[in-house]
Image (spheres, rainbow, N blue to C red):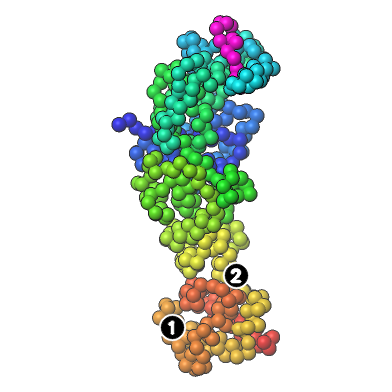
Amino acid sequence: MATIITRFPPSPTGYLHVGGARTALFNWLYARKHQGKFVLRIEDTDVVRSTQASVDAIFEAMHWLELDWDEGPYFQSRRFDLYREYLQRLLDSGDAYYCTCTQEEVEAMRKKAMASGGKPKYDGRCRERGLPRSDNAVIRFKSPLVGTTVVADVIKGDIVFQNTEQDDFVVCRSDGTPTYNFVVVVDDITMGINTVIRGDDHVMNTPKQILLYKALNSPLPVFGHVPMVLGKDKTRLSKRHGAMSVTAYRDMGFLPDAFINYLARLGWSHGDQEFFTRRELVEKFNLENIGKSAGVFDIDKLTALNADHIRAASVRQLAPRVLPFFRGKGYHAEADDYLDGVIGSLHTRSKTLVEMTEGAHFYYREDVRPYDEKAAQKFLKPEAARVLSLLAEQLNALEDLAEKSQEEAFKKVMEDTGLGFGKIAQPVRVALTGNTVSPGIFEIIAVLGKARVMARLKAAVEYIQATGA
């Protein structure tokens, strides 16, 4: 069996969005599944709209998603000599010809065809004129006038196009720049691409490309056209649905493995399984299970899946991901045991890394005051001062802050005060975090360490005494 070679060919006219990222993922997964090659190609022949900033944004998104490529990146703008060579091959074989019809003349042909109930297309006026090359001439491909062109689509099934409805389409403009359908075919031929997985907005391009493959005596690749991604209202995905740069999801605190898991499930399935590791996706991905209906992008489902991936990840895996968020928030965080403890106490209750960052604020503040006003009024009352002081004594006497040792300390305070655990834990929680919502009290104490705990309990007692709360 020939080595599977797929490709992802983004145009650098903007950021990498959800639909493009899913196309890249499907090609990457298929290549990895079959130990094949994944090629990255930058389709930058649109000189006016293509920018280096967009190229950089695409690379940044691909690196974040960890979709590594085996060949490339190739740039179409650097391959014009190759395209000219293949254009000449079409001219020499009689499969292409020069055309000097003006835009106005072509538009008149299209209107005339529509008026008579036909397809709006060029009428082939220069097809057999044998015109030489000239400054105002385009090169047109000589499409067959009879028969059909069949797209054998592994996802949609066979799609039949009548050749009588095909145009003698332009393969090179009068300024010498080759057109999209032509350069794509030349690139795929010369790069050995034998599997093309792309969005179904390309279906109408495929019969033209098949004709070019045949004219150039090259075998056809396997084609698979993936249904588009829609918003929750079943309309084309746009910014109001969350169609933003892939890296925006990174900045919102999503994990790359969670994001590709969600992208894979937007149009592909493996039974009822929803959660996939990257390794599982590579093992189980296939073209047969890509659906024929559009995927619906739902930010809530993505968030829920992200929470699952955060819970499933180890502290060591999360540390390098969350550290930039902590530092961006101004925390003096380092990759150390303290960070590991912070993450360990928060990762089961965080849906995103941004949420984890917000939840970690009290760990990195020297002083958690001012306390949340309602929390202080409710729990930092005069009688709480004795409770906090007693607990400080018990904790300070401990050799370690293991959970069992902490339990003994709390039990002693419960015996001395006659209060239940909850009546003690809530004032302690406010004293240590400044609020009433946090991880488990034993976890907090273990992570903060004795010195921080002692300082915060003391500060809370002083607050109660000073305010007479």
Which label belongs to residue 175? none
| Mark linked to residue 365 | 2
Q: Position of residue 199 (x, y in %)?
A: 50, 37
Q: Nearer the viewer, residue 433 or 439?
A: 439
Q: Residue at x 40, y 81 (%)?
A: 404
Quadrant location of the C terminus in the rendered image: bottom right
Q: Residues within 10 Å of mark 1 (few under 14, many from 20)?
A: some
Identify the amino acid type marked 2. Arg
Q: Which residue is mark 1?
A: 407
Tag 2 and tag 1, C-beta contact below 8 Å: no
- Seen as rendered, the residue at the extreme left is 1
Magenta span includes 129:
yes
Image point (36%, 36%), residue name: 36
* Residue 455 appears anywhere in the view: no
Residue 377 horizontal/vertical position (percent): 65, 83
Q: Secondary structure at mark 2?
A: loop
- Quarter holding the N terminus is top left
Marks 2 and 1 sit apart, C-alpha to C-alpha, by 26 Å
* Main secondary-structure element of the magenta-colored stretch: loop
Give the side of residue 133 with respect to residue 316, left or right: right
The image quarter in which residue 38 lies:
top left
25 or 454, which lies in front?
25
Question: Foreground mark, 2 or 1?
Answer: 1
Q: Nearer the viewer, residue 4 or 214?
A: 214
Start and end of the magenta stretch? 120-132
Q: Indicate the amino acid at tag 1.
A: Glu
